[in-house]
Image (cartoon, coloured by chain):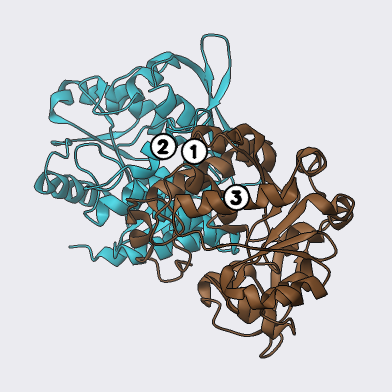
Chain colours: A cyan, B brown
Amino acid sequence: MLRPDELTAIVNVGDDLELHGLHISPDLDTITYTVAGAIDPERGWGLAGETWHAMEALGRYPRARAWFNLGDRDLATHLYRTARRAEGATPTQVAAEIGAAWDVGINLLPMTDGRFRTMLVLADGGETISFQDYFVRLQHGVAIEAIRFEQDGCELTPAARSAIERSSVVVIAPSNPLVSIGPIRALAGVDELLSGRRDSVIAVSPIVGGHALKGPADRMMTELGIESTVAGVARLYAPIASTLVIDTVDADLASDVEAAGMRCVITPTVMSSPDASRSLALACLAAGR
Amino acid sequence: MLRPDELTAIVNVGDDLELHGLHISPDLDTITYTVAGAIDPERGWGLAGETWHAMEALGRYPRARAWFNLGDRDLATHLYRTARRAEGATPTQVAAEIGAAWDVGINLLPMTDGRFRTMLVLADGGETISFQDYFVRLQHGVAIEAIRFEQDGCELTPAARSAIERSSVVVIAPSNPLVSIGPIRALAGVDELLSGRRDSVIAVSPIVGGHALKGPADRMMTELGIESTVAGVARLYAPIASTLVIDTVDADLASDVEAAGMRCVITPTVMSSPDASRSLALACLAAGR
């Protein structure tokens, strides 16, 4: 088995936002809280047993931007991150400190220490909005026509580069390929790093039976002209990963995955329990070794 | 009687601080919550019925600066202020918005829209620290040797200037004369404005029986060589106010107040109940008219 400290997660920060003066890193926090066993399992974000007194009180102020929910205990993480960033700590340092405070064991790395923002161009009118505006404020209920990454001078961090270079297996998690994995790939050199060791890069399809298990990945793919199937996913990942892990419900599309240039592993991919998650992880490691 | 909108409070912002990325204005908030009837009457700051989940959660992070307590509902005020300032609203606008949200009725004005910070030079070693470092972190348990105001380009706001010019009576509240009233007086032109209408400027002594009712005003005065009596207060205020209102316990010092150049009104000044506060306010108005 893998020791926790042998596992490194390289995490998208394109969803980060500044709100009320606070620096918020939703993907890092979600992974921290999840690995710590503190996530709210129903919502899939924020802390279990959370209270919302600050948000409720914010409702008193008519001009407040109260559409992004911040729990009272979760606020502490944003206060801490904001304070440490103001003191000069890098996002990488702060993520490590927060991970240590939650005793996560694994290495949690933001993909970059620079300011990277995922922006979405709406189909209706062409307005460009931030990821959280799209995802939370508009509840991803509008069609997009393009994704833009604002990333002046952003680089993959040395720690993240080293993890990609040295790990025996790289697993591309079943995240949204366009707005969760896409930002990492948009950093200079990442696709080259991965294609250089493509044999041991394993992707897990986020599309199961033609649909995303959660979130708008399927619609976004369709809106951008990408087939919302495991074959569509395979065409996105073929340049950088040798193998696509697909769910058993998609077994009949295995030949399409292979036609796109990827090996295909067929196994249950829905992480409905810790056992199911463990089996999937072991299948990924086996495929990469 | 005075209608609420006939009353304007010009408020010290030298105690303001930036913490965790948030802009905190303790004096404005204390007055807002007090006038709104929402203040915690025991503590004298923050909201009644407050919870502390964010602060408790901040304790998880070893490097967090958790010495300044921020209640969960109170945090909303700081989040709102910080967001509005980032959007370009002036402190004056934000104070009015927060006051309106709490339905305070009176006009609440920060003394300046600039960045003004009260700094204290410690007697032991000469280190210079911020007001909140002194007042909250060190629990004002150290001697000071000087007060310094950082106020590059700060000006009394036009609204505050107009209030001083147009009000029939100006009352200097029984606040700390050095670090609560002192910052307002340190703005260019304020002492001149007040001395120009000195007959209707009435000060209430914060020193009763030789001591401050709360806070370190008496010790600070002594440490800076100012007698901690109503006579010491009179010597501070004589240039700008015609009249000092002193408590009945200090009646025997009335001649010392007059010797310092101020008329003296002797009346109960301890605001132990709404009725006592009302009587004191009426005495101030009568003295100024």
Q: Which residue is mark 1?
A: A183
Secondary element at tag 2: loop
- Total labels: the figure holds 3
Look at the picture and state if A117 lies above or below A99.
above
How far, Cα to Cα, is label 2 from label 1?
6 Å
Discs 2 and 1 share one subunit: yes
Q: Residue at x 60, y 57 (%)?
A: B18
Secondary element at tag 3: helix
Q: Which residue is mark 2?
A: A180
Q: Amino acid at mark 1?
A: Pro
How far, Cα to Cα, is label 3 from label 2?
62 Å
Discs 3 and 1 share one subunit: no
Q: Which residue is mark 3?
A: B281
Q: Position of residue A32 (x, y in %)?
A: 32, 54
Q: Are marks 2 and 1 in contact (CB under 8 Å)?
A: yes
Q: Amino acid at mark 2?
A: Ser
Secondary element at tag 1: helix
Q: Residues within 10 Å of mark 3 (few under 14, many from 20)?
A: some
Q: Are marks 3 and 2 in contact (CB under 8 Å)?
A: no
Corner quadrant of residue B127: bottom right
Discs 3 and 2 share one subunit: no
Q: Position of residue A115 (x, y in %)?
A: 59, 45
**The N terminus of chain B: image quadrant:** top right
Which tag is nearer the camera, tag 3 or tag 2? 3
Q: Is residue A282 toward the left or the right of residue B218 in the image?
A: left
Q: Residues within 10 Å of mark 2 (few under 14, many from 20)?
A: many
Question: Can residue A161 be seen in the rendering of this structure?
Answer: no
